[in-house]
C-alpha cells in the first residue's frame, strides 16, 4: 500500500504520502489567500475544517467501502487487522479485561495514517477546491450563498458516511474583505465561527517551539523573528532561562560545526534559506508532480522563466522565495532546450 499511495491520492493531499511534502500545500495556501485583504477583488471565502478525534471516529463500514481497486483478499486482510483489536483498561496499575472497538483506527498503528488518507480521499470525490493537511481541510470557493450551501451539503454527506465530525470550536469560515456585506448570512448558513488569517501571530508562536524546523521549511522567516528566536536560544544557553543575559561567545561562533570550535547548533537563517530553496529547486527542475509547482507554472510563470519573472508581484512568500534564485544559479548547468541541476548537495542547509 505504501508504495502506490501517490498513485491513489490526489495531489491536494500531501500528508503521509511518500514522495510528497506537506510544505507544498502550505505554500499553495499562501498563494490562494493572497488578495484576501483587498477590497477590489471578487468576494471569496475559505472554510478551515478541523476534524474532531479524526482517527477515533472513522466508521469501519465506510472503511470497508474504500476499495480503490485492491484485491478482495487484500481488503479482507486490512479489515481483519482493523476490526479484531482489543482494548484493556488499566486500574491500579493492572490491566482489567478486554473489549472490542466499534469504530476508529488505532493511534500508533503504522498502517493507520495510510488508511486515513484513503478515507479522506473520498472527500475529494465531492469535487470541491480543497487542500488536505492530514486531519484538517481547507476548502475554497466564491463567497456567495449557493457556494456555501454546497459546502454545507457536501460536508454533511461526507461526515454522515465516514463518521468524521467537524470540531465547531476549531473550524472557521475565513472571508475576504470584499465579502464583508455577506458575512452574517454566510456564517448563519454554516454555523461556524468567523476566522481570520493569523499568519504573523501563528508564525511567531510556532517558531518559538521545537517545531521551528517545520515552519522554516514552509515559510521565509522574517529577519526580526529569526533574531528574536536566536536571542532567546542564546540567553537560555548561557543563563538557563530566556531572560536577557551576557553571552560569553558570539552566536556565530556557537553555530559553527564542532570540528571548527562551535557547538554545532544550526544557524536558523541558513537553515531557513536551505529548506526553502528546496521548493524553488522544484520550480527550476519543473517537478510538476507537486501541486504547488503546477499552480506556479500556470498562474505565476506562464510563459516566463523563473530567472526572469518579477520578484515584486504575487504573495509575500512568493516574492521572498523568488529572491533566493540567485543563490541557486551557480548550481545549474545550461544546455540548449534544457536546464540540468548540478551539485544539489552543495547548497548550505540542503541534504
Image (cartoon, rainbow, N blue to C red):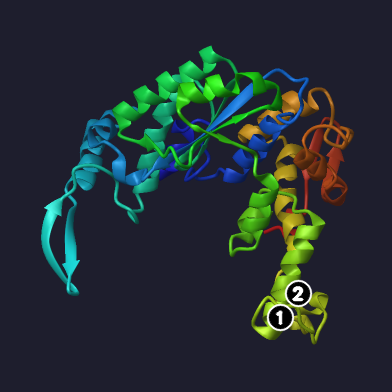
Query: Is there CB contact under 8 Å for labels 2 and 1?
Result: yes
Q: Quadrant of the C terminus?
A: bottom right
**Residue displayed at 34% across by 56% down:** 108
Question: Please, is residue 53 above or below residue 120 in the view?
Answer: below
Question: Please, is residue 131 above or below residue 267 in the view?
Answer: above
Q: Estimate the x, y position of residue 303 in percent, counting from the top left.
A: 82, 23
Q: Residue furthest bottom?
A: 248
- Residue marked by disc 2: 255
Earlier residue among tags 2 and 1: 2
**Residue displayed at 53% across by 40% down:** 14
Mark linked to residue 263 = 1
- Please indicate, yes or no, whether residue 217 appears anywhere in the rendered image: no
Distance between mark 2 and mark 1 Cα atoms = 6 Å
Q: Quadrant of residue 207?
A: bottom right
Query: In this view of the protein, which residue sits in the foreground, 133 or 3?
Result: 133
Q: Quadrant of residue 155?
A: top left
Q: Estimate the x, y position of residue 251 in percent, counting from the top left.
A: 79, 76
How crowded pointer 1 is (Cα within 10 Å; few <14, some 14-19, many 20+) is rated as: some
Q: Quadrant of residue 300?
A: top right
Amino acid at each position: 500500500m505504501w508504495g502506490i499511495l501517490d498513485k491513489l491520492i490526489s495531489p491536494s493531499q500531501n500528508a503521509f504520502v511518500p514522495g510528497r511534502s506537506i510544505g507544498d500545500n502550505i505554500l499553495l495556501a499562501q498563494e490562494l489567500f493572497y488578495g484576501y485583504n483587498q477590497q477590489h477583488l471578487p468576494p471569496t471565502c475559505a472554510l478551515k475544517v478541523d476534524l474532531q478525534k479524526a482517527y477515533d471516529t472513522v466508521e469501519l463500514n465506510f472503511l470497508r467501502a474504500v476499495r480503490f481497486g485492491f484485491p478482495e483478499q487484500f481488503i479482507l486482510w486490512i479489515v481483519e487487522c482493523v476490526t479484531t483489536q482489543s482494548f484493556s483498561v488499566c486500574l491500579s496499575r493492572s490491566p482489567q479485561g478486554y473489549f472490542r472497538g466499534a469504530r476508529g483506527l488505532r493511534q500508533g498503528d503504522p498502517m493507520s495514517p495510510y488508511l486515513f488518507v484513503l478515507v479522506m480521499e473520498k472527500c475529494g470525490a465531492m469535487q470541491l477546491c480543497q487542500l488536505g493537511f492530514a486531519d484538517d481541510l481547507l476548502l475554497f470557493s466564491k463567497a456567495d450563498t449557493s457556494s456555501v450551501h454546497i459546502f454545507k451539503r457536501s460536508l454533511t454527506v461526507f461526515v454522515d458516511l465516514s463518521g468524521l465530525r467537524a470540531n465547531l470550536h476549531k473550524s472557521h469560515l475565513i472571508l475576504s474583505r470584499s465579502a464583508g456585506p455577506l458575512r452574517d448570512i454566510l456564517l448563519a448558513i454554516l454555523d461556524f465561527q468567523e476566522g481570520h488569517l493569523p499568519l504573523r501571530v501563528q508564525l511567531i508562536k510556532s517558531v518559538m517551539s521545537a517545531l521551528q524546523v517545520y515552519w522554516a521549511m514552509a515559510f521565509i522567516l522574517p529577519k526580526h523573528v529569526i533574531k528574536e528566536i536566536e536571542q532567546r536560544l542564546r540567553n537560555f544557553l548561557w543563563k538557563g532561562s530566556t531572560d536577557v543575559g551576557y553571552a560569553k561567545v558570539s552566536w556565530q561562533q556557537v553555530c559553527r560545526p564542532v570540528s571548527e570550535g562551535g557547538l554545532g547548533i544550526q544557524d536558523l537563517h541558513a537553515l531557513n534559506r536551505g529548506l526553502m530553496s528546496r521548493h524553488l529547486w522544484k520550480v527550476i527542475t519543473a517537478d510538476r508532480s507537486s501541486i504547488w509547482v503546477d499552480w506556479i507554472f500556470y498562474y505565476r510563470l506562464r510563459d516566463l522563466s523563473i530567472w526572469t519573472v518579477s520578484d515584486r508581484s504575487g504573495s509575500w512568500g512568493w516574492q521572498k522565495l523568488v529572491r533566493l534564485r540567485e543563490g541557486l544559479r551557480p548550481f545549474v548547468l545550461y544546455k540548449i532546450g534544457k536546464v540540468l541541476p548540478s551539485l544539489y548537495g552543495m547548497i548550505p542547509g540542503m541534504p
